Amino acid sequence: MDFLEAVKYQKKVRKILILGSGAVGKTSLTKVIKTQTPLKELDEDCHYKRTLFVEIDQFKTVDATGTFQVVDLAGQLNLPIHGTRDTTRFVFNAVDLICYVFATDNTQSLIDLNEWVSLVRNYYKEKQMKEPPSILIKNKIDLESSIDDSLLELLKMDLKAYFEVSCYNGVGIDKLKQWFDVFFHECNSAFEEANYNGHKKN
Amino acid sequence: MGIKRTEINSQVSIQCKLCGAEITFDVNNKASFLSKTEHQSFFGTTLVTYRIQHIVNDEIHLNAILLDEQNLFRGYIDAYKMPALQKEDEMDYIDFSNFLLLENEIAPLPGNEVFSNFFVVNLKGWILEAIKTSSLKTRTFLQNIFKKFVESKKIYENIPQPLNVAIADLECFLWTEGKTFIVLSSHKQSLEFLNKTMNQLVKGIEDNTLIPKKRIFAFLVTLLLETDLAEKRPDIILRLLTDDLFYSKIMIRYPDRLKEIIPKVIERFPVPKKVLEELLLGKATLISMLESQPDLIKRSRALIEALDFINRRKLLV
């Protein structure tokens, strides 16, 4: 793992795992951050395109010095094969940040996060690995909300940050991107500090 | 977001997501909502989805809403419209003429000092006449009861249990659960003391845990008339009507030690020695003994507790 951390540091790459129910906008989120263009301004149509198994994408930090590798999984956990069951090492290992996504107009997608969080926690606990930090993203805030905000408070306690965005009109995306940049540098600083302390001990 | 609690724990009022109208339902009354789905713990809170509906003009508005463990509104899962069903489908009119009279070969009990009529009706198509005044036209009577029920559905958010209506010169009481109805007519003005028991029974029939048989209901009538269990221990009534232990012949595992066991049991529970002996030697079932010896009915509770006491010690075969 230390080796992987060193490689990520040298190559200036950080790994993000995006999880959440189907059709909440996980793939769109990466696309909008990467292109810096809201969906409504993209030339493509905005219809739902289902991620069948896994999509791997990447986007640069604002200063273009670093890269986030994004692992985006299918939102339907009941598929015959699923990344969280069939390619666990590829999905969960060396993850720097987990983004849980749900949609404003879909209360069920918020409830489903309970299952996603349990799945993640069980994996890292079973493998005796440190669970990466996580953030919560409420997408589709351009739509009418059907969720009582008090439910979110139950989740927020264990989270590093919480964002409200709309991939459709781009609201909140800049703030999220800025946070990713800060997080990228935090990861590097943490690695440098750990390395420095390690050398000092030696 | 449209949250208002009218009563702690059970009455919940929410706004229809489609039209904004207030919809009230009772989480303890299955008839007031369409379905209920319990979710696993959501980060320390238990959430339950209730599907509820109300009718607006020619439309049914269906809302799936999320409540927490304190029945507080936590969000809408879904909301959609459907065209309202035809009146007949909506059960505004039921034709009882084709309903099957269960165990028609066994005559119903005649009226007594408390009940003049006692029917169990299931809208799937059957009627059980437990007590009947000889001159009563059952189906016509039920047709009229049902008209009152439909009328009440229109004016009440949740129909009172029991619904008290007057048909001709009869004071009638109606308990409902899903498609099951218990209809009583009584010489008494109030049957409040029966409420818990009847609510359990109507649920039991609806859930198929209680079999609609005349023998069972005849026994029930005796229990209601001869004991105060309906008011004080409705759970015992339900057990007496449903527990296989009381309808089967049982046998003590160690008949040769019966002489030592019986005194220890009757020391704790006031039951006649001879009755207990016959029961434990499999000579008769508890129910048949209660039916044949009406004096024993008042000791139903003690007999049940004695049998439970023995059964818990694994002394029955």
Image (cartoon, rainbow, N blue to C red):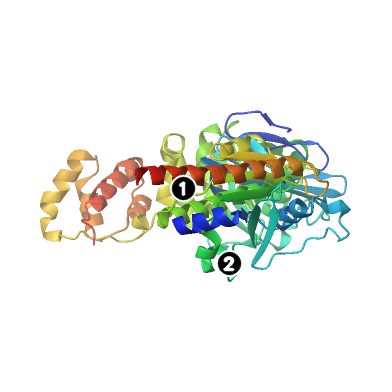
Determine the image quadrant of residue A135: top right
Secondary element type, mark 1: helix
Q: Where is residue B28 shown, x and y percent of the image? A: 58, 40
- In the picture shown, does residue B1 fall above or below B76? above
Instruction: Quadrant for residue A34, please give it.
Output: bottom right
Q: Mark 1, mark 2: which one is toward the viewer?
A: 2
Q: Is residue B259 left or right of residue B185?
A: left
Q: Residue visible at 44% across and 43% down?
A: A196
Residue holding disc 2: A82
Residue A136 visible in the shown view: yes
Residue B71 is situated, as x and y percent measured from the top left of the image, at 60, 36
Q: Position of residue A181 (x, y in %)?
A: 66, 44
Q: In the rendered image, which residue does mark 1 sit on?
A: B220
- Residue in front for this viewpoint, A174 or A152: A174
What residue sits 65% from the left and 54% below the top?
A67
Seen at 61% across and 68% down, the residue is A79
Picture layout, residue B152 above or below residue B83:
above
Image quadrant in which the N terminus of chain A is located:
bottom left
Q: Left or right of B272: which side holds A112?
A: right
Q: CA distance from mark 1 to mark 2?
A: 56 Å
Task: Please state if B89 lies on the left or on the right of A125 as rendered.
Answer: right
Report the chain holding disc 2.
A
Mark 2 is on which residue type? His
Judge the density around disc 1: few (<14), some (14-19), many (≥20) Cα neighbours within 10 Å.
Answer: some
